[in-house]
Amino acid sequence: MRPALLIHGPTASGKTQISLELAKRLGGEIVNADSMQVYRDLSVLTARPTDEEMKEAPHHLFGYKDAAERGSAGSWLRDARPIILDIQKRGNVPIIIGGTGLHLMALVDGLSEIPPIPEDSRQEVRKLFQQEGPLGAHRMLAETDPESAERLAPNDRQRVARALEVWYATGKTLSSYHENKTPPVLTKGEWLGIALTPPRQKLYGRIDSRFASMLIEGAMDEARALAARDLDPNLPAMKAHGMPWLLAYLRGEMKAELAAEYAKRDTRRYAKRQFTWIAHQFPFWPRIPSTEVDDRKRVIHALFKEIDAAYSNR
């Protein structure tokens, strides 16, 4: 068996290209760890590897869920665990790539087993935010889950809402679930984590140009197809970066140029949050700021060679 290689980085940082190069060099198979690339309905808008790219190396967990499904870190981990172990048993290297840091963290740290949140609980929390605002919602969290409230800022709406949803749905605090995690799939010595950290301004420029290319390649067609299905707007697939603004354009609520600009802006903001996640959650992962594929390949191969040798001698 060989160790796994985990590659994290912000959107548009070139993860697909480097994963293909490494798969060829290391004898690897690529496993998706991006929460949006799991949806078959979002090929263009999520920059999923093309059919031609997927022929260059074995790929797993790309485009296998329907947009009507509510994916989660837990469901992804259940799907990924047997695939990763099977790749290793066959003597190949699992190359796990994605911009969803929680998925990668779940592999190496374990994951809290939180039950599915029913829609009525989600609606209660949305109603709370509408009536009380972020500060009022945070005060409610402080009353029900003081530990989470102390850890989360009032303007961290997504995580505050998540903690409140867990309370509304289960009557238990999110903190209590964190105390009982599933065992990690990969333990110390069985994996190498790498973070791609290109210069921000260069990355933001790439985000803008890539979205323009997505519109040409069919992103609007994907939005039309989802709009025709009349799905719940709160489903994860309906919140893919750019999708809400494309849907707003299709409803006649704004011009195409404005929808595209808002989509680019939101994606840049998401990339900024990904940089923050890397800094806070993966402080010891080696960073590669270079955008050159040869530089990235050389550094990663040298680092992986060490852990591969140590793992094979265990």
Image: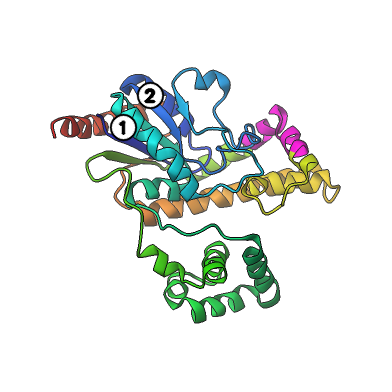
What percent of the width, then of the height, locates residue 184? 32, 48
Q: Height in image: 137 above or below 307?
A: below
Query: In front here: 222 or 111?
Result: 111
Q: Which residue is mark 2?
A: 23
Name the amino acid type tagged 1: Ile
Question: How busy is the neighbourhood of tag 1: few (under 14 within 10 Å), some, or many (20 plus)?
Answer: many
- Residue at the image point whose x is 68% and y is 47% from the top: 238
Name the amino acid type tagged 2: Ala
Which quadrant of the structure image shows residue 276? bottom left
Q: Height in image: 129 above or below 4?
A: below
Q: Per the image, is 222 magenta?
A: yes
- Residue at the image point whose x is 47% and y is 26% from the top: 59
Range of magenta residues:
209-225
Q: Which residue is mark 1?
A: 300
- Residue at the image point whose x is 52% and y is 66% from the top: 166
What percent of the width, then of the height, locates residue 158? 56, 62
Residue at far right of view: 252
Element class at badge 1: helix
Magenta stretch secondary structure, dominant: helix
What percent of the width, then of the height, locates residue 161? 57, 66
